[in-house]
Image (cartoon, coloured by chain):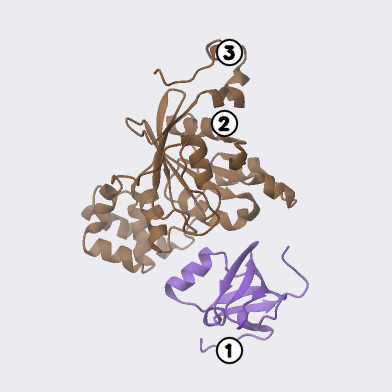
Chain colours: A brown, B purple
Amino acid sequence: MSDELVTPQASSLPHAACNTCPAYTNAQLRKLGLDVSGWDYTVALAGNPNTGKSTVFNALTGLRQHTGNWAGKTVTRAEGGFRFQGKRYKLVDLPGTYSLLSTSADEEVARDFLLFGQPHVTVIVADATRLERNLNLVLQILAITDSVVVAVNLIDEARRHGIMIDERGLARDLGVPVVPIVARRGEGLPELLSTIAQVASGAIRPRPRHVPLRDAALERAVKQLVAQIEAVFPNLPQAYWVALRLLDGDASIAQAVREGTIGDLTRGQAVAPIALEAA
Amino acid sequence: MNTSPPIGATTLDQLSLGATGRVLALGNQGAERRRLFDLGITPGTLIQSEVRSPLGDPVAYRVRNTLIALRREQSQMIMITLDLEETIV
């Protein structure tokens, strides 16, 4: 515990509000860089391309994962660690993706990890200036996991364009915590950290909104297929998602099911991360 | 597509530069159809022709505050109505 930074005042807090004060939470963040050994929780960073995922990643881990303004910059996932309030977190920075349904190579990395890597918490970084379009991916991720935190990034830029984000309304409508941030300047990151910690520990249990299928015949077909998939692949998470993909005629998923390799996707998520230069 | 467009409707490639239309339906199939949906081109969406490449193909369209470049063979399949009153900011 020698690498834990705790301010002297932290142990004798006069007021409960001090727990959520940015100055207090920041002091408890210990950037662990590449050291992801013995982590307690895995946290995935997902989002559309170019929303600032890598900026958040670098701010929390102290690493210098390359940031840049072009599509496909993060082609494979990068991993780093941080410690917060005595727990060690492994943070996985995923390539930007518009959808869990399209299939380009880099998007598949993100898709497979979110579906089968089963992170404890998924942080979706959304662009406040293009929120409507970002919500497509948000709703798709909410369909496969409950443990989601939405970080609405670039709120300073949105404000300059006259866009105000109603984060409370958004959190209510989505059923998951929403934290406004300016990752580049570190604004909102203490709040994001404490929200991640609360979702990871179960102190906050998000109840995400699910988009209904709106079709009784489709619901029956999915149910039938889920039962069959679970019979063949008992350890496969996301049988429901796989069933929907099969009904949608997704050729790559159909092939993975036919060849039995769909079960390997889960195990494949344990492979070594790419090397990163520590800060 | 072998269906003729309804009255008042046209295809996206016919949208003149700077004009705004509203997406009616997508005739695109398979992965391309899925991709266009994921990029936010869904029925009811406002779409504005914003930048034309020197040879006229592809054309960049503004959709949900993002520029998306489409080739003519893609935009030909997207049916729109002209939305003269509205512009996308």
* Identity of the residue drawn at 52% across and 82% down: B73
Task: Tell me the tag on residue B4.
Answer: 1
Q: Position of residue A170 (x, y in %)?
A: 62, 45
Question: Could you say whether the residue bearing mark 2 is in a helix, strand or loop?
Answer: helix
Judge depth for marks 1 and 2 and give the one in front: 2
Task: Tell me the tag on residue A13.
Answer: 3
Res. A177 visible in picture: yes
Task: Tell me the tag on residue A190.
Answer: 2
- Image quadrant in which the N terminus of chain A is located: top left
B38 or B3: which is nearer to us?
B38
* Identity of the residue drawn at 43% across and 22% down: A86
A269 or B41: which is nearer to us?
A269
| Subunit ID for the residue under disc 2 | A
* Identity of the residue drawn at 40% across and 29% down: A88
Sequence-earlier tag: 2 or 3 = 3
1 and 3 marks on the same chain: no
Disc 1 and disc 3: Cα gap in Å?
72 Å
Residue type (three-letter) at the residue carrying disc 1: Ser
Judge depth for marks 1 and 3 and give the one in front: 3
Judge depth for marks 2 and 3 and give the one in front: 2
Left/right of residue A127 with respect to residue A97 in the rendered view: right
